[in-house]
């Protein structure tokens, strides 16, 4: 459908705008740019941690990219500390340091080769601490000031070895454990003689170990051969116990205390039928905060660290709590909170009063936040009777049944949650679309069984969930089942392509952002440090039987079934899904006369982080949906 109408655009020479390569996309009308401008200028703030002076350290954007800022009190000005062309990914002060500097991580061009830097507050100068080439991930500070643990691929560009560094002498950083695969450091023992380290194998298996720094001895916390997921852990006061999050091989992640001597465990959240998603403990080890993922919305609990079961639920607006951190005086807790009607901001609560106070108020482009839509949580039956949850954003005013955009999250070990999205709010409020965000099988948040339902040879079952959602849409009188588009990024991009292959007569168009078009070429070309992790989810392409299956389910091998207009979005430096995945689907579809818009950002990776790039993408997507979904007859 619509091929001839857009063929002239597809045949036009690609043009450039800054670092964007715009191929087959018409000029964006001024009317679209004007309507999207306010939504493009929505800001957000998220928590990095606390400064020794009692200010919150946050990430927010005033220019092109997100940078480090500090905020001294509720409603105080956001004081910008870093001013780089590249966004800052993380920042942390040494809780026992002198407060004169902090560490931060930053990559270049979205390649995710994070480098570690020390930022001096007096001079405003930053010093590179890592090698400038490998991927490095910040870990915890030691009890002795000035020392930090981190993981790095420096040795072979593939495996995340564990390192210890005195930040005043980065040239003397010491590799304390050579590993295979993805490892990270969770905590230091009270005397700094041991590290608590985690080996991530897959979404259903992450192993916990204690590393003796002097001898290099590595001791597993659980029995070897057991399959369970450790999502987080920290040493107790005397290093003979751990506070940890584990599913214990069961359905949900629970908060537990583990005795390292006897192996005995005490559960503290077994009565909560959801995943404990994270915890934080105050510096004096008196207070504990933990979050629970209740089907896509968060609950926040406070408890004495010595008695986690004596928890109190903090009253918060419906939404999602992400980063959580106590101040260095152990008196206040800061969190990042986002709701469907409010972009993410930092809230602080006194541990005794437990009343959250908003410290940052991010602008929403002058829009009235009361007009933003709160989604309805629904479930629909899939082909095998499985109940699949989905968030539905319906427009307040509609002249008749509204067109629909199905937006599918990435991962696949991810989850669509009740969060703010200026893009989705624009689609609903300005274009009159209904947006549905399903959590198809394979999504996290619904237990170990659910997350494994799409593994290996069951890959197409998650695509069948989209078919069942199309059936459900057809039963809703306020939805137009003849005008449905599909949108997604990363694994969600694969789902877009797979849905266009499976249901060409039931879909009108698709937007595929950094998506997988062929599992075999993806597994062969994704960065080496990710390859085995992705094989654990999708299957090992080196095994002939699995390779044949992966080729069978890859959309690239079924382009003859894609009959709908497609918009492909890609970052040139993507280390996860390489640009070849986008270019081979674009080339193959155009070779047979298909309608394809293609947007390539030469300064981005796995998704767009620069405001100018994001703005253009939002406007182009709006034009695409207007042309092929809203106006389509």
Image (spheres, rainbow, N blue to C red):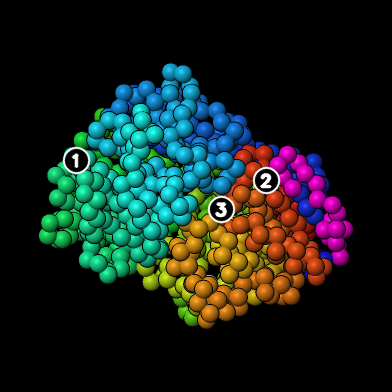
Helix or strand or loop: what does disc 1 sit on? Answer: loop
> Answer yes or no: do the residues labelled 2 and 1 have beta carbons within 8 Å?
no
Mark 1–mark 3 Cα distance, whole angstroms, equals 37 Å
Read off the residue under disc 3.
Answer: 575
In the figure, is residue 240 to the left or right of 523?
left
Residue toward you, 262 or 372: 262
The N terminus: image quadrant: bottom right
In the figure, is residue 70 to the left or right of 477?
left
> Answer yes or no: do the residues labelled 3 and 2 have beta carbons within 8 Å?
no
Residue 227 image offset from top left, x and y in percent: 30, 68
Name the residue located 22 percent from the left edge and 57 percent from the top edge: 219
Residue toward you, 300 or 123: 123
The C terminus: image quadrant: bottom right
Closer to the chain start, of discs 2 and 1, is 1
Label 2 crowd bin: few (<14), some (14–19), many (20+), radius 10 Å: some
Mark 3–mark 2 Cα distance, whole angstroms, equals 13 Å
Closer to the chain start, of discs 1 and 3, is 1
Read off the residue under disc 2.
Answer: 602
Residue 330 image offset from top left, x and y in percent: 25, 33
Read off the residue under disc 1.
Answer: 190
Label 1 crowd bin: few (<14), some (14–19), many (20+), radius 10 Å: some
Q: In the rendered structure, which segment of residues is drawn in magenta?
A: 4-21
Query: Is 312 colored magenta in this rendering?
Result: no
Helix or strand or loop: what does disc 2 sit on? Answer: loop
Name the residue located 24 percent from the left edge and 51 percent from the top edge: 216
Residue 272 image offset from top left, x and y in percent: 28, 60
**Above/below status of 39 relative to 503:** above
Residue toward you, 281 or 607: 607
Label 3 crowd bin: few (<14), some (14–19), many (20+), radius 10 Å: many
Name the residue located 36 percent from the left edge and 56 percent from the top edge: 179
Name the residue located 74 percent from the left edge and 48 percent from the top edge: 21
Query: Is 8 colored magenta in this rendering?
Result: yes
């Amino acid at each position: 459908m619509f091929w001839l109408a857009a063929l002239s655009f597809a045949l036009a020479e690609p043009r450039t705008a800054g670092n964007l390569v715009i191929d087959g996309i018409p000029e964006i009308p001024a009317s679209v740019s004007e309507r999207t401008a306010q939504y493009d200028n929505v800001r957000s703030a998220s928590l990095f941690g606390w400064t020794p002076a009692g200010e919150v350290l946050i990430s927010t954007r005033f220019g092109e990219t997100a940078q480090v800022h500090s905020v001294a009190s509720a409603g105080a000005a956001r004081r910008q500390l870093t001013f780089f062309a590249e966004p800052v990914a993380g920042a942390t002060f040494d809780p026992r340091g002198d407060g004169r500097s902090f560490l931060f991580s930053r990559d270049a061009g979205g390649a995710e080769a994070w480098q570690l830097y020390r930022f001096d507050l007096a001079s405003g100068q930053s010093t590179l601490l890592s090698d400038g080439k490998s991927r490095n991930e910040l870990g915890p500070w030691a009890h002795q000031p000035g020392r930090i643990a981190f993981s790095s691929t420096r040795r072979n560009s593939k495996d995340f070895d564990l390192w210890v560094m005195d930040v005043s002498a980065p040239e003397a950083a010491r590799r304390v454990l050579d590993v295979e695969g993805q490892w990270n450091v969770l905590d230091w023992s009270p005397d700094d003689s041991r590290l608590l380290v985690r080996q991530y194998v897959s979404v259903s298996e992450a192993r916990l170990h204690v590393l003796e720094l002097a001898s290099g001895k590595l001791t597993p916390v659980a029995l070897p051969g057991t399959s369970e997921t450790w999502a987080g852990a920290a040493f107790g006061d005397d290093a003979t116990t751990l506070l940890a999050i584990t599913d214990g091989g069961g359905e949900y992640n629970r908060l537990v205390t583990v005795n390292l001597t006897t192996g005995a465990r005490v559960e503290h959240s077994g009565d909560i039928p959801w995943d404990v998603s994270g915890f934080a403990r105050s510096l004096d080890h008196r207070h504990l905060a933990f979050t629970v993922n209740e089907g896509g919305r968060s609950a926040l609990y406070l408890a004495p660290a010595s008695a986690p079961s004596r928890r109190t639920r903090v009253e918060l607006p419906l939404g999602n709590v992400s980063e959580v951190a106590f101040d260095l005086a152990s008196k206040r807790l800061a969190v990042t909170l986002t709701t469907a009607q409010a972009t993410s901001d930092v809230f602080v609560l006194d541990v005794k009063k437990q009343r959250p106070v908003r410290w940052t108020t991010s602008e929403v482009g002058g829009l009235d936040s009361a007009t933003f839509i709160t989604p309805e949580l629904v479930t629909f039956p899939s082909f095998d009777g499985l109940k699949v949850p989905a968030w539905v954003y319906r427009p307040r005013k509609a002249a008749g049944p509204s067109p629909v955009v199905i937006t599918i999250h990435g991962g696949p070990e991810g989850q669509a949650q009740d969060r703010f999205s200026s893009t989705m709010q624009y689609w609903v409020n300005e274009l009159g679309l209904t947006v549905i965000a399903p959590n198809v099988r394979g999504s996290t948040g619904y237990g170990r069984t659910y997350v494994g339902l799409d593994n290996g040879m069951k890959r197409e079952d998650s695509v069948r969930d989209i078919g069942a959602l199309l059936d459900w849409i057809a039963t809703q009188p306020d939805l137009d089942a003849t005008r449905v588009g599909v949108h997604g990024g990363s694994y969600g991009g694969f789902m877009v392509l797979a849905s266009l292959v499976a249901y060409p007569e039931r879909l009108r168009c698709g937007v595929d952002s950094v998506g997988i078009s062929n599992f075999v070429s993806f597994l062969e070309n994704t960065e080496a440090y990710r390859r085995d992790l992705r094989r654990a989810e999708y299957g090992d392409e080196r095994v002939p039987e699995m390779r044949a299956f992966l080729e069978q389910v890859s959309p690239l091998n079924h382009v003859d079934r894609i009959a709908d207009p497609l918009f492909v979005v890609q970052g040139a430096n993507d280390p996860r899904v390489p640009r070849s995945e986008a270019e081979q689907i674009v080339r193959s579809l155009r070779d047979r006369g298909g309608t394809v818009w293609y947007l390539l950002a030469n300064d981005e990776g796995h998704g767009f982080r620069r405001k100018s790039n994001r703005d253009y993408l939002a406007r182009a997507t709006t034009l695409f949906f207007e042309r092929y979904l809203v106006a389509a007859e």
